[in-house]
Image: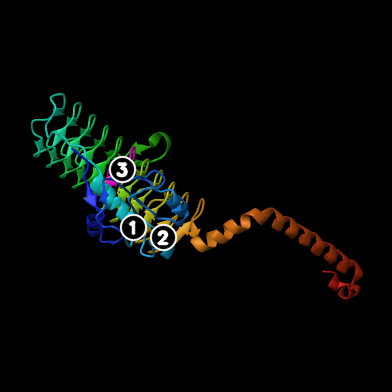
Amino acid sequence: MSAPRRTLSELAEYVGGSVVGDGDVEIRRVAPIEEAGAGDITFLAHPRYRAYLAACRASAVIVGPDLPGELAGVSGRNWLRVRKPYTAFAEILNLFSLRPQYDGRIHPLASVDPSAIIGDGVTVFPYVYVGKGVKVRRGSVLFPGVFLGDRVEVGEECLLHPQVTVREGCRVGNRVILHAGVVIGSDGFGYAGEGRERIKIPQVGIVEIEDDVEIGANTTIDRATLGRTIIRRGTKIDNLVQIAHNVVVGEDSIIAAQTGIAGSTRVGREVVLAGQVGVVNHVEIGDRARIGPKSGIPRSVPPGALLSGGVAAAPHHEWIKVMTLLPNLAKLWNGMRRLERKVAELGRRGRKGGKGYARRKGDL
């Protein structure tokens, strides 16, 4: 399949932007600003990349709404002006990307139980295992090594990359992408008692992944002890994330790499958890809260909060003040010790000199 070609005017209509320059110029490819040439479109999303424009040979550049006058007047330069350049770049890149084509057949080296229901156009690669009562709906792709336990349901147009495991009874919605090594529905970490009397608590719930979720490589999401662990619609989860039993993650949230969320936590809508955030069990994180990298969350977080920090996260503005003081801690500490010694010395003088101390109090 040959790569698509579009005029700059067609791309402007596609992303809801406007052309400054020649709208009839033909675009064949999307390229980075430092490598783009004739027939390419690139984007300028940050001022620090403006230095590349002088040598850039791209046929067009995606820019924000505030195109500086000195750029608009550059001879021979064509601009695609949009409200959000990076978003427009993503939309155009999707338009130009050649998507892989799959044959919609079940390979003879796949193991598919006779009771499984496989929809039209589903591609099943070699060495896939599909258990009893499984349902895989139209257009989904199961790459080599995928394991679907008994009674699993997979929706339409899903991509399950190599070595993905979806355990018994779990449900995956439509247009879900599970990257290599994802495990959905492993046992929750639940035990009763202590020491030698510790007893494993059966994990008899499921995981439910709603539509348009993407989950990065080697992320694990535990099945519920009872009921459901739920990842709501549109959420995007990075690599190497651990989500424990009975957690609920709200719509359109972002969870970055190496984050861990303990059991029965509720994460609201459009929440952002940066890399290596750790969340204790049984807390709530309010809608649209944003939590910075390496933050520990020991208690519930209100909606809209902006937190960052180390072992225990604090309001962002307070943490910035603490970080500003850190380089001066040694100096402040030494100064405090000198003041302590001075106060102690004046105290000794006061005890020895009685009323005479009052006449020397200016020494402080």
Residue at 11% from the left image edge and 37% from the top image edge: 133
Residue 364, position as x, y percentages in the image:
82, 69
Labelled disc at residue 221: 3
| Circles 3, 1 touching at the beta carbon (< 8 Å) | no
- 37 left or right of 336? left
- Viewer-side label of 3, 1: 1
Three-letter code, disc 2: Leu
Mark 2 nearby-residue class (10 Å; few <14, some 14–19, many ≥20): few
Instruction: Name the residue at 35% across, 45% down.
Output: 37
Residue type beneath disc 3: Ile
Residue 71 is marked as 2
Residue at (17%, 43%) from the top-left corner? 157
Give the residue at mark 1: 79
State how far apart marks 3 and 1 are (Cα).
44 Å
Mark 1 or 2, nearer chain start = 2
**Horizontal relation, residue 251 to residue 328: left or right:** left
